[in-house]
Image (cartoon, rainbow, N blue to C red):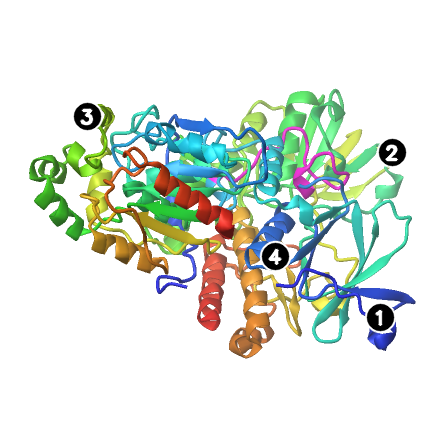
């Protein structure tokens, strides 16, 4: 392992300069972008495989999205996890026994900070440093240009053996383009600007979006606001957090453990939800058109309750905004003074040429296993997945896979040719069992177990290659 | 490394569906006077033993030499909460929880059947290094050896009773008899289920993070035959470090300093 930088004279070759700045050679070191849940995991697993790592983080602390102090953090005061503990922890660093089934976001931040300290990761992280550009260099290497996150200060370019992108996908708000939105006199905010319930107190609130965030905010508005309308485009399965007094994702894992096929599991869960939650259309909610787990599930026990209390009124999709009112798809009008758009986030890779990741018109990169970039064996993305439950295990095994891939490749490129060929051939393949309901937005949705099995297969083949 | 190495098993539906329930956990601790950045050590006692067996001598010794030292009592042992139906997975959970609760990446040191627990825990926590002292890694041959040496103490365990070890098995003659008997008096028992699982061996998954592993024991151990020691060491790619003349309970026996110093020397040499 070489960790020391190689300060050759800049005059030895033209490729040692970029934009009139010398490039500092980082040898076998790997660059990780972001120190959130995915970046930390990548740093830890790369270190475990013996790599020197430089991680760049624009904020001054770890935790990324889970650190509410960060201006790009999407969490609000009441955010609790929607996956229970076994799915919300790295598989090799469990959450403490004393914590609840669904920890609060502040606990998750404490967990990530402990992870960073336990594995001594902070000394590899350059805080307050933003990655401006990542450009391919000869020999499958990468020139990474950074500057201090304030925006002023000199830029600095360093050449790394590999780059792991872990910049998260829940920070760039996706704002739908509604007709008449600019003329609307009420206040319109994206959910990313929603921090706590005081923003809702006494207001007439329209919450747009049926995802987990939309439902959480609707529930809070139901308790705090003067009125609350909750607009969704279609019907969802509202999974309670508990079934039979056990976290519902653990009940589902019990069905998985019995190796029931997917259709049978869905059948059992439909039955269960019909028993526990009952007929949603009675509450004025549209019936789900998809089967449970075909779309990202909504885990919320309280929404139906607040609809039953009459404090949240379910309404159809927004058609257009008028000056003082919002017209809905069924022609009715509502008159909120605050509209919260819980319309999700859009992955963004400002520092990379879109062609490098094969990004298409919809902003979708073309990757193998949502991690490897075809044509660029030393570039990978970690954490760009969403599953029906628990993303921490997925991120962990992605990181392990990337670290082992880089290690195997640097030891013997020939032995990894088979996987390299699969990266080329398998790029863009979805790892979801069903037809995803909204492929333009949900392209990084995976089925937890199907995806893990694919990772397992890749890990096994890397193990064979390393022998 | 060893032949057992393979990619880890990552689809763990049974563990997800039925997480191990939390039980009060006793962790004893000896702190260092000055933190020199050495890794924390987590000692894991074997079946029937509580954390106290390490608190007697080894914790202090490790702390004196600059290693923050901890010992955990598996559930149902020592002052940890009762768990009559605990299985091996629950014990592994206790160790992994205790390790992840330490401020830095820890070295796991298992004694007796605690070494088997550590072996499993290594697949769930990337330890900095691991030490298996007088390891009882289970299997039917172990039962044969135990029955030959101590038929009346062993036989009830086959039918779910407590495994009773004699002072003569655990300690050398150098340890005063009164002390030896007082130690034997303090021993408890593992759950019947875990005892059974010790015989019907489960596959030990490969360690994560590829930690260096040291195996040590005594050729005169009357619980772990020397052949078992060799086999355990070979599985982890080495030869065992031997302390002739000592009994099974290396941390309580008269010459307890020798093995613990050897472990600390090994860690100081860079394994940690």
Q: Chain of mark 4?
A: A
Report if the CB atoms under discs 1 and 2 are less than 8 Å apart: no
* Mark positioned earlier in the residue sequence (4 or 1): 1
For residue A375, above or below residue A325: below
| Residue closer to the observer: B40 or A36 | B40
Q: Quadrant of residue A372?
A: bottom right
Marks 2 and 4 sit apart, C-alpha to C-alpha, by 36 Å
| Inter-mark Cα distance, 1 to 3 | 73 Å
Which residue is nearer to you in this view: B267 or A344? B267
**Dot 1: what SS?**
loop
Q: Which residue is mark 3?
A: B181
Chain letter of the residue beneath label 1 in the structure image: A
- Quarter occupied by residue B60: top left
Residue annotated with mark 1: A9
Read off the residue under disc 4: A444
Which is the main secondary structure of the residues drawn in magenta?
Answer: loop
Q: Are marks 2 and 4 on the same chain?
A: yes
Instruction: Let me know if residue B239 is in the magenta part.
Output: no
Task: Answer whether residue A242 is visible to the viewer in this image.
Answer: no
Position of A39 with respect to A270 (left or right) is right
Quadrant for the N terminus of chain A, please.
bottom right
């Amino acid at each position: 392992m070489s960790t020391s930088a190689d300060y050759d004279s800049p005059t030895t070759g033209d490729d040692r300069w970029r934009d009139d700045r010398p490039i500092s050679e980082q040898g076998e070191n790997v660059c990780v972008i972001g120190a959130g849940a995915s970046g930390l995991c990548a740093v830890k697993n790369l270190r475990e495989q013996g790599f020197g790592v430089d991680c760049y983080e624009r904020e001054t602390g770890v935790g990324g999205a889970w650190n509410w102090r960060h201006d790009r953090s999407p969490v609000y005061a009441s955010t609790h996890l929607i996956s229970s503990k076994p799915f919300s922890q790295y598989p090799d660093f469990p959450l403490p026994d004393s914590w609840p089934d669904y920890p609060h976001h502040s606990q998750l931040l404490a967990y990530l900070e402990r992870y960073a300290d336990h594995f001594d990761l902070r000394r590899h992280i350059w805080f307050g440093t933003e990655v401006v550009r990542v450009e391919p260099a000869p020999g499958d290497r990468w020139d990474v240009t950074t500057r201090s996150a304030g925006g002023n200060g000199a830029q600095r370019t360093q050449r790394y053996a590999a780059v792991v992108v872990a910049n998260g996908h829940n920070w760039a708000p996706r704002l739908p383009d509604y007709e008449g939105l600019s003329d609307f006199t009420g206040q319109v905010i994206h959910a990313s600007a929603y921090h706590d319930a005081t923003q809702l107190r006494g207001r007439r609130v329209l919450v747009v979006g049926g995802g987990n965030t939309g439902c959480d905010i609707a529930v809070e508005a139901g308790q705090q606001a003067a009125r609350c309308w909750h607009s969704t485009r279609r019907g969802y399965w509202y999974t309670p957090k508990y079934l039979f007094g056990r976290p519902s994702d653990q009940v589902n894992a019990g069905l998985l453990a019995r190796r029931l096929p997917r259709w049978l599991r869905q059948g059992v869960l439909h039955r269960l939800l019909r028993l526990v939650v009952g007929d949603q259309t009675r509450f004025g909610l549209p019936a789900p058109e998809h089967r449970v787990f075909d779309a990202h599930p909504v885990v919320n026990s309280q929404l139906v309750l607040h609809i039953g209390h009459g404090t949240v009124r379910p309404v159809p999709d927004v058609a257009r905004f008028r000056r003082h009112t919002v017209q809905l798809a069924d022609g009715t009008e509502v008159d909120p003074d605050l509209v919260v758009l819980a319309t999700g986030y859009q992955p963004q890779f400002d520092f990379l040429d879109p062609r490098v990741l094969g990004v298409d018109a919809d902003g979708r990169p073309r990757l193998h296993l949502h991690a490897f970039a075809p044509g660029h064996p030393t570039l990978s993305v970690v954490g760009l997945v969403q599953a029906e439950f628990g993303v921490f295990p997925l991120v962990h095994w992605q990181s392990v896979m990337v670290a082992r891939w880089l290690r195997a490749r640097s030891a013997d490129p020939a032995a990894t040719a088979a996987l390299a060929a699969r990266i080329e051939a398998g790029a863009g393949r979805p790892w979801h069992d069903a037809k995803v309901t909204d492929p333009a937005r949900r392209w990084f949705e995976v089925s937890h177990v199907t995806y893990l099995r694919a990772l397992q297969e890749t890990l096994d083949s890397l193990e064979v290659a390393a022998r | 490394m060893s032949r057992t190495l393979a990619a880890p098993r990552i689809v763990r539906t049974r563990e997800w569906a039925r997480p191990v329930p939390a039980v009060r956990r006793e962790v004893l601790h000896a702190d260092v006077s000055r933190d020199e950045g050495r890794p924390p050590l987590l000692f894991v006692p074997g079946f029937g033993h509580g954390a106290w067996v390490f608190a007697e001598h080894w914790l202090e010794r490790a702390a004196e030499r600059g290693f923050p030292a901890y010992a955990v009592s598996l559930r149902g042992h020592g002052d940890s909460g009762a768990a009559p139906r605990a299985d091996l997975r629950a014990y592994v959970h206790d160790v992994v929880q205790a390790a992840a609760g330490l401020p830095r990446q820890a070295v796991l040191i298992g004694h007796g059947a605690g070494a088997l627990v550590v072996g499993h825990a290594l697949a769930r926590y990337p330890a900095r290094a691991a030490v298996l002292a007088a390891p009882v890694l289970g299997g039917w041959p172990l039962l044969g050896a135990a029955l030959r040496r101590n038929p009346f103490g062993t036989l009830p365990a086959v039918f779910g009773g407590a495994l009773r070890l004699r002072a003569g098995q655990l300690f050398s003659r150098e340890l005063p008899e009164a002390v030896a008997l007082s130690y034997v008096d303090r021993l408890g028992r593992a759950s019947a289920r875990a005892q059974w699982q010790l015989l019907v061996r489960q596959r030990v998954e490969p360690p994560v993070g590829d930690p260096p592993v040291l195996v040590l024991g005594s050729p005169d151990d009357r619980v772990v035959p020397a052949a078992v020691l060799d086999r355990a060491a070979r599985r982890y790619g080495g030869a065992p470090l031997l302390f002739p003349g000592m009994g099974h309970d290396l941390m309580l026996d008269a010459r307890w300093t020798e093995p613990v110093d050897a472990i600390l020397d090994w860690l100081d040499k860079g394994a940690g």
